[in-house]
């Protein structure tokens, strides 16, 4: 199982801060496709993904125990 | 040569409380410094003519702290003998409230301005903090939503860096 953290509009949309997924071995790109289909998240192309608090590319493979976060365009400052 | 990685993790904070500017400045005081610049980011009422009632900031706190620390390290590499401290507030902020304070101390004044500018631009690129604008007639997470902007290469471009 991996933990997926949601922030900003994603947290608002789902109404939860985190979800669990059995997606070990899949790539970040595959995760995005699953999220698009299952939750109709529709802006994932502009969203960055972090695994264990570091930004990763779509090619990164997800491993057991990873903590994944969807990072929509940031707007701090 | 100073401590190029000498920034204490305590120099970077995410807080729900009002930021005390002087506390942030004190963290970068050093004998080697001839200049300290302070950037104070505040909540603006009007954006493109639209009136903001208040803002809500949210952070992925543990990662945001790491990224603030990374910015400090980048600054120390680019401008030797520099110390950086950054505090960002989250939660509900009213108009004129302070959202972020950045203090940078350097041996000479020119790099102090440059390094401080670098810090705020990097915050807007890599630190996972988001703001939600609340207006009289709605609300929206900034940097997202249909009809605003799409970061086609996964990160903001130059034109996005002037808010």
Image (cartoon, coloured by chain):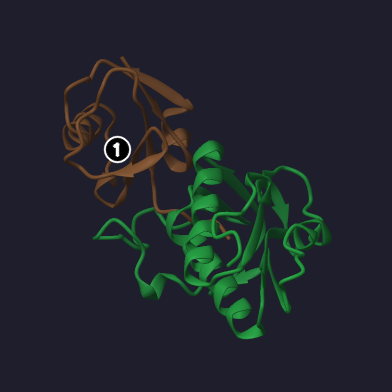
Residue B84: which quarter of the image? bottom right
B133 and A58: which is toward the camera: A58
Q: Position of residue A43 (x, y in %)?
A: 29, 47
Question: Compared to A60, does B25 lie above or below?
Answer: below
Q: Is residue B130 left or right of residue A4?
A: right
Q: Position of residue A47 (x, y in %)?
A: 32, 47
Q: Is residue B1 left or right of residue A36?
A: right
Q: Residue at x 49, y 40 (%)?
A: B63
Q: Position of residue A56 (x, y in %)?
A: 28, 43
Label the brown chain with its letter. Answer: A
Can the viewer see residue B139? no
Q: Residue furthest front?
A: B1
- Quadrant for the N terminus of chain B, please: bottom right
Mark 1 lies on residue? A41
Within 10 Å of the Cα at label 1, are there few (<14), some (14-19), or many (20+) other Cα atoms?
some
Can the viewer see residue B159? yes
Label the green chain with its letter. Answer: B
Q: Residue at x 55, y 43 (%)?
A: B59
Q: Is residue B130 left or right of residue A44?
A: right
Q: Position of residue A69 (x, y in %)?
A: 39, 35
């Amino acid at each position: 199982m991996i933990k997926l953290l949601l922030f900003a509009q994603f947290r608002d949309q789902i109404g939860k801060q985190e979800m669990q997924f059995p997606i070990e071995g899949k790539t970040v790109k595959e995760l995005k496709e699953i999220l698009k289909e299952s939750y109709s998240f529709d802006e994932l192309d502009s969203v960055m993904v972090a695994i264990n608090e570091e930004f990763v590319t779509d090619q990164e493979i997800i491993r057991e125990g990873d903590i994944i976060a969807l990072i929509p365009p940031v707007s701090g400052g | 040569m100073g401590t190029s990685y000498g920034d204490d993790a305590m120099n970077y904070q995410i807080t729900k409380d009002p930021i005390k500017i002087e506390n942030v400045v004190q963290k970068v005081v050093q004998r080697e410094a001839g200049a300290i610049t302070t950037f104070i980011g505040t909540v603006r009422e009007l954006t493109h003519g639209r009136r903001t009632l208040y803002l809500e900031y949210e952070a992925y706190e543990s990662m945001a702290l790491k990224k603030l620390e990374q910015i400090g390290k980048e600054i120390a590499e680019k401008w030797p003998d520099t110390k950086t401290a950054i505090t960002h507030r989250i939660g509900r902020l009213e108009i004129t409230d302070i959202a972020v304070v950045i203090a940078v101390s350097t041996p000479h004044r020119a790099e102090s301005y440059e390094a401080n500018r670098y810090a705020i631009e990097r915050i807007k690129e890599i630190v996972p903090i988001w703001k939600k604008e609340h207006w009289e007639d709605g609300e929206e997470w900034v940097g997202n939503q249909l009809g605003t902007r799409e970061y086609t290469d996964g990160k903001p471009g130059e034109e996005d860096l002037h808010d």
